[in-house]
Amino acid sequence: MELLTDKPGDEGLPGRERAAVMAALMTSTVMVVFDGSVVNIALPKMADALRVAPSVAVWFANAYLLSVAMTLAIFAALAGRFGFRPLFLPGLAVFTLASAGCALASDAYALIVLRVLQGIGGAAVVSIGPAILRSAFPGRLLGRILGLNALLIAASTAIAPIVGGTLLDAWGWQWLFALNIVPGAMALAIGMKTIPAGPRAAHGPFDTPGAWLSAVLLGALIMTANHVTMPGGGWYALVALLAGAGFVWRMRHARHPLLPPVIFASARFSLAALTSMTSFMAQGITFVALPFLFQNVYGYSAFETALLFTPWPVGIVLVAPHAGRLADRMSPAVISTIGLCVLLAGQVSLVWLPEQPQVWDIAARCLLCGIGFGCFQSPNNREMLSNVSREHSSYASGVLAIMRTFGQCLGTALVGVLLAMHVQGGVSMEQPAVRLSLWVAVAATAMAVALSLGRLRKTARTSCLDA
């Protein structure tokens, strides 16, 4: 396997050690991504089993999401200060132990606390995952390994509803969490021997005020997105605005800020980060809007809807590794821009689905979207990581995770806002709301294309100056 083949002058780890790092990291990443998706399908049964209202059960999912989002930047900064091992290994241990606790929980509020702990452990893993891959693998293979990482994330997203539904019907909701225990222990055992120490780029005292501001900012942004149409949503927005202003001031004036401003000095890095956020927002909108279309307009069941979605991640699985390989030889910005254009075409085709489409027609359009997103994701990730120095890889990895998480949350919230707006006389007008949501997704992808084209102009200008 080329990923594990050593060549003269390669930086990073030897081939055998790279294989072990890849096994530990990707097992951990799959568990964290899987756990973020699989619980949603079980919320009604969990509410009944634990005898709580649906409004409480929602926090079985939200507590995990919030704790991940609020700690991503903190763990990225801590990794820049202490290296990878002191963050990744305890984080994986906390995630695995909290998973066991969730499986044994008999009280709803204890489960929520354990989900918070699980999210904190998961954030420690995913915030520095790409940085660990960059540290372990030589630069010539970075696109390929990031493509494989994208493939596994897409596969986890695809199988989560199906596996979750099967486990739920066969053994109960507790197995959704117990499933993590054995692979988590195995990944921890492998990681203890192989995860590299990583560079330590940060010096001086830790930016505690910046850490609190980042946590409040990201948490308030997600709560704002989820409460836009509810009473009290404006307070979350105000908190987010104040925390954001404080965080930016801190980053510009603190001697040792949580995120070093130098990583944003590269316009290509900043544009790649914004492109990532808008593309994940577009995907998030589509993933939430289409189930309403498939179930409430076309009349498919929940299981049939999950199957109709499968071509999207299948497209990512088919294309992402090859896109990553090409990004090692060609301009990642060019490849990711082409992918965004394909995604845009696929999303426009979904908007124009006929009133009673054939199953193959829906599948083909979802597959086109998946191919476009798979062509975009791994080259764009490579562009972000390769435009910062190796010692700042953990910061870039954290920003990448933040953009992905916030983009998905914002997309989900936008669909909720549009559905709430299309209620007349107590009657929900779902079909026009869903169609409008899909058009908003198209607009978000078009914005991502524009940002990516701006990145290409920066690349061309830099090449001319170098010449």
Image (tube, grey):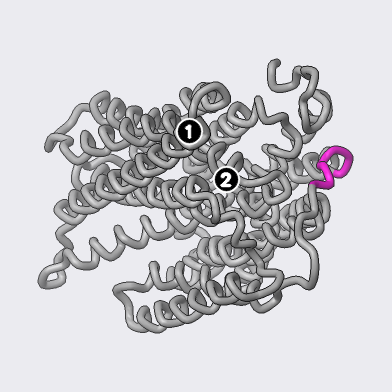
- Residue closest to the eye, 365 or 447: 447
- Name the mark nearer the viewer: 1 or 2: 1
Neighbor class of circle 2 (other Cα within 10 Å; few <14, some 14-19, many 20+) is many
Determine the CA span between mark 1 and mark 2: 41 Å
Q: Residue 386 falls in which quadrant of the image?
A: top right
x%, y% of residue 147?
A: 56, 30
The residue wearing badge 1 is 463
Point 80% across, 18% down: residue: 8
Q: Which residue lies furthest to the right in this view?
A: 193
- Residue closest to the eye, 396 or 278: 396
Point 38% across, 31% down: residue: 339
Task: Please say whether residue 260 is visible from this viewpoint.
Answer: yes
Q: Give left or right: position of 331 versus 8.
A: left
Q: Do the residues labelled 1 and 2 touch (CB within 8 Å)?
A: no
Residue 193 lies in the magenta-colored region: yes
Point 81% across, 31% down: residue: 13
What's the mark number on residue 103?
Answer: none
Q: Give left or right: position of 283 versus 179.
A: left
Provide the residue span drawn in magenta.
192-198
- Residue closest to the eye, 141 or 270: 270
State whether residue 89 is above or below residue 461: below
State whether residue 263 is above or below residue 425: above
x%, y% of residue 123?
A: 65, 57
Amino acid type at mark 1: Ser
Amino acid type at mark 2: Phe
The residue wearing badge 2 is 34
The number of discs equals 2
x%, y% of residue 83?
A: 80, 53
